Image (spheres, rainbow, N blue to C red):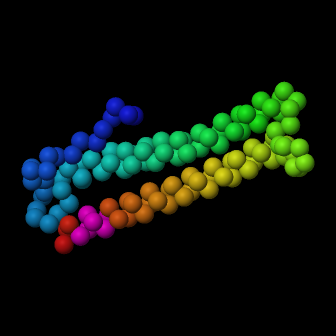
Amino acid sequence: MDTEQLCLPAPEEKPETDQPGNIPQFILNHEDEIIQYIKDKATKETLKSLAPLLEKLEEAVKQQQAGTPAAPTGAPAINYEEQLKNMQEISKEKIKAKELRITEKLMKLQAKVANINR
């Protein structure tokens, strides 16, 4: 998706509208693509933030399969299922936080579009 970009009209061009004060025609025509673009960007950022956690999980699995304790001595060892569950919970929380931020951004965008209509 890196090659796919959202094309906006040049700043000097006046966006087409049905009537003065209405939502620009470009936004109406490309609303689904704009929303999909925002979702794709959020998904990419989420995956980037989860990559270190997944690497740690993979390393823990490799260590456990090799018979090397994943946890330092003296600390209670967490089995694979517990580690996986913990990582999944952390991932879910991060995804929910990203979804909330996206929702807030969409609400702000809708508010701006509504103000344009006035």
Residue 28 lies in the magenta stretch: no
Give the residue drawn at x 14%, y 66%.
Answer: 21
Image quadrant containing the N terminus: top left
Judged left or right of residue 23, residue 47 is right
Residue 80: x %, y % from top left = 81, 40
Residue 44: x %, y % from top left = 48, 42
Residue sticking out furthest to the front: 73
Give the residue drawn at x 71%, y 34%.
Answer: 58
Residue sticking out furthest to the bottom: 118
To which quarter of the image does residue 66 belong? Answer: top right
Residue 113 lies in the magenta stretch: yes
Judged left or right of residue 66, residue 48 is left
Residue 28: x %, y % from top left = 24, 53
- Depicted 17 relative to depicted 73: above or below: below
Residue 49: x %, y % from top left = 55, 45
Residue segment shown in magenta:
110-115
